[in-house]
Image: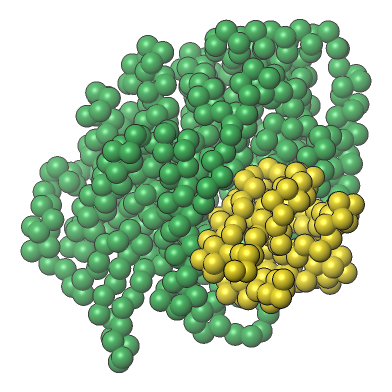
Chain colours: A yellow, B green
Amino acid sequence: MARKIKVLVAKPGLDGHDRGAKVVAHAIRDAGMEVVYTGLHQSVEAIVQAAVQEDVDVIGLSIMTGGHLPICRKLVRLLREQGAQDKVILVGGVIPRRDFEPLRELGIEGIFPGGTPLEETVAFIREKCGDR
Amino acid sequence: MDVARYVKDDKDVIQDVILSSGIHVKPRYGPEDLDAVGFDYQTDLGEPGQYPFTRNLFPQGYRTREWTTRQYTGFGTPRETNERFKLMISHGQTGLNVAFDLPTQMGLDSDHPMAEGEVGRVGMAVDSLRDFEVAFDGIDLHRVGAGLTINAVAAIMLAMYQAVGEKLGFDRTRISATPQNDILKEVVGRGAWIFPLDPAIRLIGDTIEYAIESMPRTNPVSVCGYHIRESGATPAQEMAYAFLIANAYIDEVVRRGYEPDRFVGRFSFNFNIFGNLWEQVAKFRAGRKVWARNLREKYGVENPRNLWLRGLFAGGGSGLTKAEPENNIIRGAYFALAAALSGAQTTALCSFDEAFTIPTPRAALLSLRTCQILMEEVGMRDTVDPLAGSYFVETLTKQMEDKICEEMAAIEDRGGIVECIRDGTVQQKLARQAYEFERELEAGRLVKVGVNKYASEEEQEVELHEYNEAWAEEKVRELSDLKRSRPARPAADALRALEGVARREENVMPALVACCKAYCTVGEMADVFRQVFGTFQEPRIF
């Protein structure tokens, strides 16, 4: 039997508004995937460590404060250092349209700002991880 | 959780209306409905300004005193914040509501590694008394009260407020601060917690005790249903959980030997307004009654003034949408109308751009004007509790009262609010409800205009508040300058004294005031507490 797709839902930084993160976590779990939630106030280092330890396929970040670019830049760099650059990265929260391109340049394709239909996020993960 | 659910037949005729709290609305109401819910004029309604205060805290409502407007304000460095305070006051705002950045809320100085990218972003960065001296410069603190949106380190910020008052020539007995200081709701909803629940609740007890003895015009706690609702609670749960949390803080102070009548009159609340207008109005009318009865029956409070459900009833961000953001201007106006019809004593209104970020001055001013127009032009000051006597509103108020009491009982049956928050029961329930709400919205069973009905493809451009990285650099520079230039010995002594009282479980407030006056930083004081208390271990369930 195929292994379930495993997703780490993470809240990087100091912001504690986790309603959105938990809603997405529910949707992913209801879609039959396995979800690990980091809890609040995580450093990027701790998120990378959790992703490697838990051997997840996907890292989903929820960022509401506007710090998504530096956070994602650091995440991508640390994943590469760990040899874990194969993990699919999603970012959600308050992400203005003008930042989509800089995020894509970092190699982040899954950009799902608040208000994105849940099914879209789930479908994206399936598409990216389906053939694993 | 938000808008009501409408069940319609194939001709678009409404067959049923189900409010977020689960109450069904009928197509018409009459005297028989009041009988059916057991409505009694004297016990359920009574006179405005009299127990159980369903109608209002004051006999003539807004005729004798209009509401206080308190827009949430603060960003960047204390200098920027001071300018914005003065701008809002010059436009007729009557109170302050201070926003702190996340590092400050989390007890970290601006130069902490976790603060990177966050200094001054969502509020004002405060490291030491120096920052308060700049932020409150030129503001008459005897006249203008300040809400301080701070929780885990509220005791530190209350001490800082006393210190700045005294430094700027204001008497601690005459200044009025309202720190939010509600750690249990932080764990439920807003996430800015640091210490384990028991010492965190003890710190709240310290601030209440200190306010009783030393700061008679300060309201040491503002219990927030607001953020609980933002996290997915129904309006009935919002009230119920806030009341239980308030009771937990009362119990902490009673344990120290204080009579409730000596301090419960200082409690204030912060509640949320969005969604169905009638449900909001009924929530506040019922809430005033439930709170007054709770204090009288559970705690034996006798002085009628101490039974008041005082507080900030504020238009909430969860009701706003990112789609077609200008629609939020209109939504905000209806939220403010609901606040006025509910007899809000103090109000604030989330600005239309707050679905994205903190407001621009233009958006903040528009929110203030919305509140002012209601008071000055629309007739909200004419008569007290204008909806009283409506068959519908009185029936709904009574039903809402029952719902609030049911929700309170359900938590009490599961071991009480502190335990249900400690183990994540409440958080899990609200996260589930938030998820179900999104599902209902996506399925079109709940409607938000411009989102899932009448949505247009066109994107509305709105001007947004811009974060300036230079603020952080300036703040870090100032902090290193402070640490170099302040007398080192008094600061170190003050911190050592703080550690001593924290370990001995004595009231920490006098030691905190001494630390603030010695220019110890927020991070240094919070670190003392981290060492003594440890940190909260969050239940990571959802």
Q: Picture coordinates of residue A126 (x, y %)? A: 65, 74
Q: Determine which quarter of the picture holds residue B280.
A: bottom left
Identify the residue at horizontal 64%, vertical 17% (top origin).
B532
Is B8 rendered above or below residue B197?
below
Identify the residue at horizontal 62%, vertical 32% (top origin).
B194
Tell me if residue B206 can be seen: yes
Q: Residue furthest front?
A: A1
Task: Tell me the quadrant of the picture where the N terminus of chain A can be found.
Answer: bottom right
In the image, A68: left or right of B296? right
Marker count (numbered): 0
Tell me if residue B375 can be seen: no
- Give whichever of B211, B207 is nearer the camera: B207
Is B244 rendered above or below residue A103?
above
Identify the residue at horizontal 66%, vertical 84% (top origin).
B458
In the image, A107: left or right of B18? right
Q: Picture coordinates of residue B182 (x, y %)? A: 51, 34
Task: Tell me the quadrant of the picture where the C terminus of chain A can be found.
Answer: bottom right
Is B355 rendered above or below residue B76?
below
Q: Picture coordinates of residue A131 (x, y %)? A: 71, 75
Q: Determine which quarter of the picture holds residue A98.
A: bottom right
- Give whichever of A87, B368 is nearer the camera: A87
Identify the residue at horizontal 42%, vertical 34% (top origin).
B419
Q: Picture coordinates of residue A58 (x, y %)? A: 71, 62
In the image, B62: left or right of B178? left
In the image, B188: left or right of B417? right
